[in-house]
Amino acid sequence: MMQTNRRSAAWMLGWAWTLAAGVLTVAAQEFAPPDRESPGDPMIQAYLAAEASRLHAQFTLDLSSKTDWENKLERYRREYFYMLGLWPMPEKTPLKATVTGKLERPDFVVEKLHFQSRPRLYVTGNLYRPANRKPGERLPAVLYVCGHSSVGRNGNKTAFQSHGIWFARHGMICLIIDTLQLGEIGATHHGTYREGRWWWHSRGYTPAGVECWNGIRAIDYLQSRPDVDPDRIGVTGISGGGAATFWIAAADPRAIIAAPVSGMADLPSYVTNRVINGHCDCMFLYNTFQWPWTRIAALVAPRPLRFVNSDQDRIFPMDANERIINRLERLYSLYGESASVDAVVSIGGHAYREDLRRAVFRFFRTELLGDPSRVIDSEIDLVVRSGPKRHYPIPPEQLRVFPTDKDLPSDELNTTIDEHFVPVADPGMPSEDEFAEWKERLLGQLRQVVFRSFPPRIEPASIVQRQGSSWQIQTERGIRVWMAPASGFPAPLETQRIVLLLRGEGGVGGGWLTRRLQPGDRVLVLEVRGTGPTRWTRRNPPNYVERSHVLLGQTVDTGRIRDVIAAARLCRQAFSVPVVVAGKGRAGGWALYAKLLESEIDDAWYDDLPSSHMDREAPQLLNILRVCDLPHVVRMVEGP
C-alpha cells in the first residue's frame, strides 16, 4: 500500500543521509535561516534546541514493553486532554443538530448542517451520503477535517468537496466540518502567532483544543444518525486537517482508523529548525508535561494509521517524517501490529496530489468496507484549476449552511471562544485559619502545571566571568545573564542587605525604589534572559522564541523567574545577607513568583503590578489562570 518506499525514494532524490550513533537519519530541513539581528539570538536558539533534543529523546522510555506503555496510558490520556485545554472534560451538551438544506445529485446527496459542540459554539458542515441506501442499512463514515484553505464566507469545507463526493460515491458517508478560523463564522487561529493574545498561554487555551473537541462532537453526531454504522468511523484531513486528525484520533478511540496527511513534525523540526514559524496556533498543544511530540501520534496505536506526507513539504519536512514513522513502527510492534501503521510518501511539495488521494481512499475502502482493490477513478480531480481560479463540481456558495449573513446565529461564541473555552480557576481568598492549607494546595498545583519545567530546587547561579564590577552568571545550562551594581545607588560601606533590581524589557524602572531602601542596602541590577545584552530578535509574526517555549513546557517568563531565583541564591551565597528581589510592571511579577517559590528570598518588592494575567503586560505563565491569578499570588506572598 505504501506508494513510494521511504528510504529508496530519499536516496533517489538525493537526500543527504548520515550514519550517527547507529541510527539512520535524513539531513535536517530548516524553515528559514536563524535570526542573527540581536546579541541574544545564538544563546536562546541553542538553549531551545538543547531542550527540544532532551524531550525528543525521552520517547525511548515509552518503548520498554507493551505492559509498561499500557500502564501509562490512563495518565497519558489525562495529560493529553489537559494540554489541549480539555481536562476536566467538558460536558457533552445537546448537539442541537440542524439540517438547513439538501442538494440532491443522481449518485449522492449533500446535507448542509450545523451543530453546537458546546452551547453557542457552532460547527458548520456538509454531509455527503450515497443517494441509494438500502432500507435499514448502516454505512461506514468518514470525518473529514479541513486544512487552511481560505474560501471566505462559504467555509473551507467547500474546498474539499471532491473528497466528500468520492466517499459518497463509494458507499461511505463523509462529514466535512469547517475549522474555527476559516468556517462560515470566522474566528481566529493566530492569537499568539500575530495577534498578541499572550494570555492564551496563561489561560491554557489553544485552538487545537477547539478543533479536537469539535471533532469529538462530530463523531457523536455521526453515531446519532440511523444511516451510520457507529463502529466503522475513520478520520482524515490534510495540513491543518492532518494535525486535527491526530488531535481527534488520539483523543477518541471511536475513530477506528486515521490518515493524517501532512499533519505532524516533531520538536527538533518545529523548534530547532524553526518550522513552527510556518504554522499557526491550531497546530500545537501546550506541552505542559514535556512530552516527546511523537507520543501524541502514539496514542492512536494499535488502530490502523497511515502517516501521509510529501518528500519536499516545507512545513512537514521529511527528516521529521522519518523520525516519526520509525518511532511509530517501533511502538506498534509492541502490540504485534506493525502492519497497521505505514507511511505513504509522495514526490512534491505541500499538496494533496493524485497518488496521495488514491492511497488514502484505498486505505479507507480497505479498512471500512473490506475492499482492498486499487482505486482507479480518482485520476482526475473533481476540482479543476483554470489559471488562478478553481472550478468546483458544486458552486461553493450553494454549500453554505447559513445562506446569507442575516442567517448567521446572533448568539454565537465562535468569535470569542478563546475567552470561554478553558475555564478560569477561582480558588477564592482564605480566612486566616484556612491560609496555610490553601497556599499549600495552590503551590502544589503551580509546581505541577505552571512551573513543571523547574527542578525540585533551583541551584544558585555560577559566576562565569567578571568584567569590572559586573558578573556574567549562568542560571541554568545554556543560559548566561548579567548582574552589576545599579547606577545611581551608591554602595554602602557595609552591606546589610542585597536588593536585586530586575531589568524589564523596557529597563529597570528603579525610581520608585528609593523610598524603600534602608542604610546598608546594596542594589544590584539583574538583566534576565532576553533583556540587555541577551535580548533576542522579535518579529510579529511569527514570535518564534515565545511560541517555541510552550512546545517545551515553558514560557519566556518562567525562564526569567528561574534566572531571578538562581541569581538570588548566588547573592545569598556570596554576601551572606538577606536578599530582596524588586521589579516594576512585568518584572514585578517575576519578583513576586520568585519569592513565592524560593525560601531563600527574604522579600519581594513590586510596583505597578498588573491586576491579572489577562493583562497584556502581565507575565506569560503557562496554565496559570487554570490555578489562580495575580491577586491570589500576592496573598500567598504577603501572608494571611
Image: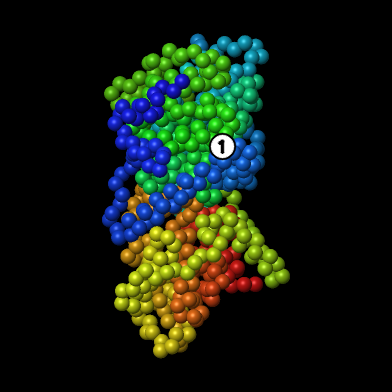
Q: Describe residue 487's horizontal placement relative to residue 221 as left or right.
A: left
Q: Position of residue 88 (x, y in %)?
A: 63, 46
Q: For this view, does 88 lie left or right of residue 36?
A: right
Instruction: Count the labels in the image.
Output: 1
Q: Residue under circle 1? A: 299
**Which amino acid lies under the numbered mark 1 shown in the image of this protein?**
Leu
Q: Which secondary structure lies at badge 1? A: loop
Q: Residue at x 43, y 26 (%)?
A: 344
Is any atom of residue 623 visible in this view? Answer: yes
**Image vertical order of residue 106 relative to residue 356, above or below:** above
Quadrant (top left, top right, bottom left, bottom right) of the C terminus: bottom right
Q: Please give the name of the residue rendered at 54% of the width and 54% of the height, measured from the top-left corner.
A: 623
Image quadrant assignment for residue 502: bottom left
Considering every residue shown, the one lying at the far front of the view is 22
- As displayed, is residue 449 above or below residue 141? below
| Image position of 17 (left or right of 437) | left
Residue 97 seen by the camera: no
Q: Alpha-carbon neighbours of circle 1 within 10 Å: few (<14), some, or many (≥20)?
A: many
The x and y percentages for residue 408 are 51, 34
Q: State the residue lying farthest toward the right.
A: 433
Which residue corresponds to the image point at 63% horizontal and 21% vertical from the top-left? 229
**Rendered location of residue 184, percent (x, y):** 47, 33
Along the line of sight, which residue is nearer the eye, 368 or 415?
Answer: 368
How is the model colour-coded? Answer: rainbow
Q: Quadrant of residue 262?
A: top left
Front-lying residue, 331 or 601: 331
Name the residue located 31 percent from the left edge and 33 percent from the top edge. Answer: 15
Q: Compared to 628, does 145 lie above or below?
A: above
Of residue 37 and residue 615, the one placed in the foreground of this image is 37
Quadrant in the picture for residue 359 = top left
